[in-house]
Image: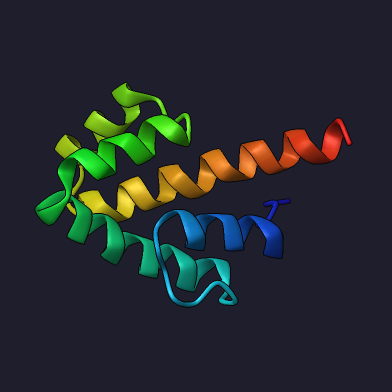
Amino acid sequence: MKKSLNPYTKVLISNSFELDKPEVSQEELEILLADRVEYLLANRLEFFFAKMYALDIDETKVHEALSTNENPSLAVAKLIIQRQLEKQITREKYR
C-alpha cells in the first residue's frame, strides 16, 4: 500500500517552496511543486540547490533526475515528495 503525505508534511513542502496552496491532494502538490522547481531552475539555481541540500535530497539523484528525464522538474518534485515521505515515516515511527 502506498503511503500518502499527511497534512503537516504537505504544509512543510508548501512553505519550503513558497507555494500558495498547502491544502491540496498529493498529485496536485506534485504538479505545483514541479512548476516551482522549473521556475527555480530557470531563475534561482543557487536557491534550488540550497533547498535540495536543506531537505537532504541526494545530489546524485537530483543530477540524475535533471539529466535523464523528459520532464526534469516533475522528476525532482517526485524526489522531494519521496524524501519528505521518508522523513514523515521516520517521525511517525519514533514518535
Q: Position of residue 70 (x, y in %)?
A: 17, 51
Does residue 72 appear left or right of residue 3 in this picture?
A: left
**Vertical comparison of 18 with 24: above or below:** above
Could you tell me which residue is drawn at 74 percent across and 33 percent down?
Answer: 90
Quadrant showing the C terminus: top right
Does residue 21 appear left or right of residue 40 in this picture?
A: right
**Vertical comparison of 35 with 81: above or below:** below
Residue found farthest to the left: 42
Could you tell me which residue is drawn at 47 percent across and 36 percent down?
Answer: 55
**Vertical comparison of 84 with 7: above or below:** above
> Residue 63 lies in what quarter of the image?
top left
Q: Nearer the viewer, residue 9 or 64?
A: 9
Residue found farthest to the right: 95
Q: Position of residue 52 (x, y in %)?
A: 37, 36
Q: Nearer the viewer, residue 30 or 52?
A: 52
Does residue 24 appear left or right of residue 35 in this picture?
A: right
Q: Give the number of marks.
A: 0
Could you tell me which residue is drawn at 30 percent across and 22 percent down?
Answer: 60
> Residue 8 lies in what quarter of the image?
bottom right
Q: Nearer the viewer, residue 60 or 49?
A: 49
> Residue 88 lies in what quarter of the image?
top right
